[in-house]
Image (cartoon, rainbow, N blue to C red):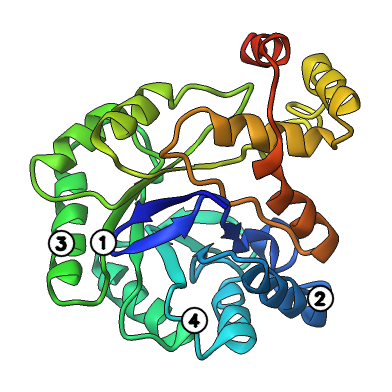
Amino acid sequence: MQSFPLGRFSVSRIGFGAIQLPGPGAFGPPRDRDAALAVLRRAVELGVNHIDTAQFYGPDVSNELIREALHPYPADLALVSKIGAQRDDAGGWLPLDLADYRKDIEANLHALDVDQLAAVNLRLMGNDGPDERFDEQLSIMIAARDEGLIGGIGLSNITREHLLHALQRTEIACVQNAFSLVDRAAAPVLQECAARGIPFVPFFSIRSPFAPPDQVVGQEAVRRAAERLGRTPAQIALAWTLSVAPNVLIIPGTSSVEHLEENLAVDSIEFDDETRERLDAVAT
C-alpha cells in the first residue's frame, strides 16, 4: 500500500476505523466479540498500521477490543483516538465537559495500555467557527502533547477557519472530517491540508448514519463503475475518495473480515478518464 506521514509514523493510506466494532450506533458490546477480534488481527496481518478509535465508542468497547486483539502492538502501529464527545445511557451523543478532556485522554491511554497515542483528534460537536471555547480546547490538547501523552494534535469536524486558527498556535498532525462523493462540504479543509502536507482523514465515505444507506453506493455512476470494473459500489466509493489527493488517509470500518479484505483491495483500483469524470460529477 502507499503510505503517508502521520506524526512520527508513516502509515498506509488505507487504515481501519473501529467505530463498527461495538454494537449498532457504536453503542454497547459487539454482536460477535470473536469476529471483532478477528477483524483487528486480520487488518494488521494485511498491513494496516493506522487504527482510528475513541473511548466513547461503546463506550469503553473499541479500545478494550483493540488491546485484547493486538497488545503488545507492532512498533509501526499508529493508534489515533479522539475526545470531545460522550454518550448518554441511551447511546446519544453529547459534548464532553472541558473539565473531563484530560481525564478522557488518560482513559484512552489506560484502556489501550499505552504511554502515548500517535495522535488525538479534538472532535468538535458544533461547527460555528473558532471561539473562546475552541481556544480552551486547544490549550488542553497542547498541554497533553507537551507532556508526552499524545504524539500529535488532530482536529475533527472543523472548518477551514478552525484549521487556520489552530495553526497559529500549534502544529496539527491530522484532520478528520466527513467527506464523500456526495458530501464535499469539507473540500476547502481538504485543500488547505493538502497544501500544507497535513493528513486528511475522511469519515462517512461510504455512508452516513444520518442519511439513506444508498446515498453514495446507490448513485448511478458508482453502480456503473462497479459493474464495469468488477468491484462493489462500496469499493468504488472508497477508491474515489482515496484518489482525491495524496494526503487522504481512509479509515473504513467493518466488523466483517470479508468486508475488511474488500476495503483493503481498493488501492489497486484505477479509473479511466470517462469513469473519473462521471464520478467527479456526482452531486447530491
C-beta proximity under 8 Å, tags 4 and 2: no
Mark 2 and mark 1 lie on one chain; the one further toward the N terminus is 2
Label for residue 142? 3
Gap between marks 4 and 1, in whole Å? 19 Å
The three-letter code of the residue at mark 4 reads Pro
Gap between marks 2 and 1, in whole Å? 31 Å
Left or right, 254 with respect to 280, comes to: right
Residue 34 is situated, as x and y percent measured from the top left of the image, at 80, 82
* Secondary structure state at the residue bearing disc 1: loop
C-beta proximity under 8 Å, tags 2 and 3: no
The residue under label 4 is: 74
The three-letter code of the residue at mark 2 reads Ala
* Secondary structure state at the residue bearing disc 4: loop
The three-letter code of the residue at mark 3 reads Ile
Q: Quadrant of the C terminus?
A: top right
Single out the mark in the foreground, 4 or 2. Answer: 4
